[in-house]
Image: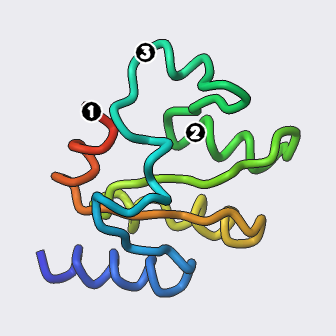
């Protein structure tokens, strides 16, 4: 468990991940997502899944506003976090319980 925590901390430090509280307004757009929100919220749409986000970053056709992730996924997402950092996309991390509370699943 200490190794997982260490890898998570290293991923956050190396890639500029911002750890936020559940009430942080920067994650309001992710709050209480519903299936219909994946298609769009006004002039935004929600993209779900590491591979989908990675493809969007790689092809750069649509600019990303931000990414919200559970801290338990940070270490495994190192290559994506590096690409997001290079693309100047803010990454907001919440602990697993807060993440589930925010996104609603």
Seen in the image, is 14 located left or right of residue 11? Answer: right
Counting from the top left corner in percent of width and height, residue 8 is at 33, 75
Checking the image for residue 104, the label placed there is 1
Evaluate if marks 1 and 3 touch, with contact meaning CB atoms under 8 Å apart: no
**Image point (24%, 62%), residue name:** 95
Query: Under tag 1, what secondary structure?
Result: loop
Seen in the image, is 79 located left or right of residue 43? Answer: left
- Name of the residue lying farthest toward the top: 36
Badge 2: residue crowd in 10 Å (few <14, some 14–19, many ≥20): few
Instruction: Give the Cα distance between marks 1 and 3.
Output: 11 Å
Seen in the image, is 56 located left or right of residue 12? Answer: right
Residue ID for mark 2: 51
Dot 2 or dot 1, earlier in sequence:
2
Foreground mark, 3 or 2, reads: 3
Badge 3: residue crowd in 10 Å (few <14, some 14–19, many ≥20): few
Counting from the top left corner in percent of width and height, residue 30 is at 44, 41
Instruction: Give the Cα distance between marks 2 and 1.
Output: 21 Å
Write down the quadrant of residue 98 in the picture. bottom left
Query: Under tag 3, what secondary structure?
Result: helix
Instruction: Give the Cα distance between marks 3 and 2.
Output: 19 Å
Residue ID for mark 3: 35
Task: Work out whether residue 29 or residue 89 is closer to the camera in this orientation and state it.
Answer: 29
Q: Relative to 70, is 40 above or below?
A: above
Dot 1 or dot 3, earlier in sequence:
3
**Image point (49%, 59%), residue name:** 26
Task: Work out whether residue 6 or residue 30 is closer to the camera in this orientation and state it.
Answer: 30
């Amino acid at each position: 468990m200490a190794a997982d925590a260490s890898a998570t901390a290293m991923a956050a430090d190396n890639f500029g991940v911002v750890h936020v509280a559940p009430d942080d307004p920067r994650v309001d757009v992710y709050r209480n997502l519903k299936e219909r929100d994946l298609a769009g919220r006004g002039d935004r749409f929600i993209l779900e899944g590491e591979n989908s986000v990675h493809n969007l970053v790689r092809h750069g056709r649509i600019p990303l506003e931000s990414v919200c992730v559970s801290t338990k996924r940070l270490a495994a997402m190192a290559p994506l976090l590096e690409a997001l950092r290079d693309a100047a996309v803010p990454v907001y991390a919440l602990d697993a319980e807060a993440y589930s509370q925010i996104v609603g699943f």
